[in-house]
Image: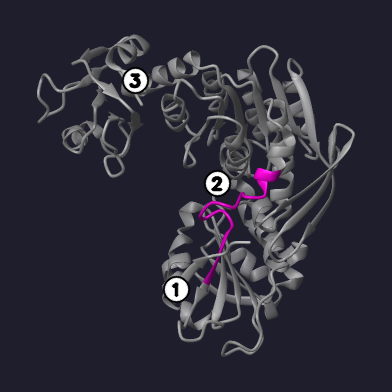
Amino acid sequence: MTLWTASEAEAATGGRAVGNWTVSGVSIDTRTIQKGDLFVALKAARDAHDFVANALAAGAGAALVSRIPDGVADDAPLLIVDDVLKGLEDLGRAARARTDARVVAITGSVGKTSTKEMLREMLMPQGRTHAAEASYNNHWGVPLTLARMPRDTEYAVIEIGMNAPGEIGPLAQMARPHVAMVTTVAAVHLAAFDDINGIAHEKAAIFDGLVDGGVAVVNADLPTSDILLDAAKHASILTFGERGATSLDDVSLTADTTIVQATHMGAPLLFKLATPGRHFAANALGALVAADAMGADIGRAVLALGQWSPFKGRGVRETITLDRSETNYTLELIDDAYNANPTSVAAGLEVLSVTPPKTGVGLVDAGRRIAILGDMLEMGEEENALHAGIADVAALEHIDLVHCVGLRMKHLWDALPPEKRGEWTATSHNLAAGITDIVDAGDVILVKGSLGSRMAVIVDAIRKLGHSTPNTN
């Protein structure tokens, strides 16, 4: 299916098309480029103009450039613009303008990607649905997601993130959502803000992009909910949570599921998630409110939500078989290594606390609940206290050992009761090197930390102990 013709892309960007080409996709990475893609030569750590020749040789239908790169013929299929990022933004705006899709945008300190995937799962059975396949939520990820949107899309789900003040508003105005949702506001990116109120004001900027008559979906349980509600007063407002108009009445966690009782539009609403997590329950409820506001059938959405499972690195669970000849000789891994802040670490520890280990299968007769926690980054001046404060999380009562990685997480290690204090290492590589000494068959292991802590190294080391099988319910 043709996504862009040369003339359409030329008109959208004000650039100059070389050749009469068509493309069926948009890519920024030659490692994953597909035949027929438009390769966008962004400048990041390296100037992607250096890879245009490779992209065209790999089958790219054209390339978006600001100059003709070395090794590329003058008559190669190109779209030449003054600024490549601006050209991508222009494509995104044009894609948004030409579709009749209902658009929902999501932001929040925690849970953006999970909620985006929940909404994708709920909307796909009800219409042609477009959403990014990864966490493309920044200054290039949002326009890329929009530029990839087919013109016959019926539902679009756009994730919007930020690292600093002033980033969310322009991206929301580019997406022009019919529905905008804030999952939560938490102590994330405090290094760039004075306090959590500053984060709330930045998150609330997503409502600036709402189309006329748009709907704001707001978590009513936050200390900063009033800031969000004030920013959304020009829109129709729907709230969710324990104090929301759509009320979260009860959450029950088991080892494998989350059962949620709620009240929506005055009627009882019961749904189940095939993974444990109180934080997932709140996000799912907000996502259902958003889906309803998008015009989707909420009954069908509830059924589809039961098929959702977390992304890699965001709470996905898998069984590691340590000895193929002994099928019961296993451990369970909870891979939550993509990101971390005090709120999400507490949520991860609660999930670990309700997941039962096995007994009688390992060298340590009783299986253990083990947390391996890496540094939480961008926490600002209070980062040491925020790390130490994890020791006060109630779920730790039910966790046997906590291993800590990183100079910041040393403050948690020092604050832990001696009987729960595992190993501390400065780097994830150091802990991974001794992984066979700290885990055993029967254990349930949570690995969590900010991406920069490189906790995925430990996840990979655990996987390499045996054969990994994703958990399904």
Decide: marks 1, 2 in contact (CB < 8 A)? no
Q: Does residue 57 appear left or right of residue 111 in this picture?
A: left
Image location of residue 199, percent across then percent down = 65, 34
Tell me the amino acid under the disc marked 1. His
Frontmost of labels 3 and 2 is: 3
Q: Does residue 112 appear left or right of residue 432 in this picture?
A: right
For disc 3, the marked residue is: 4
Q: Between disc 1 and disc 3, whose residue precedes?
A: 3
Instruction: Tell me the number on the disc at residue 68.
Output: none
Decide: marks 1, 3 in contact (CB < 8 A)? no
Instruction: Tell me the number on the disc at residue 467.
Output: 1
Magenta stretch bounds:
303-319
Q: Residues within 10 Å of mark 3 (few under 14, many from 20)?
A: many
Q: Residue at x 60, y 52 (%)?
A: 309
Element under label 2? loop
For disc 2, the marked residue is: 378
Q: Quadrant of residue 430?
A: bottom left
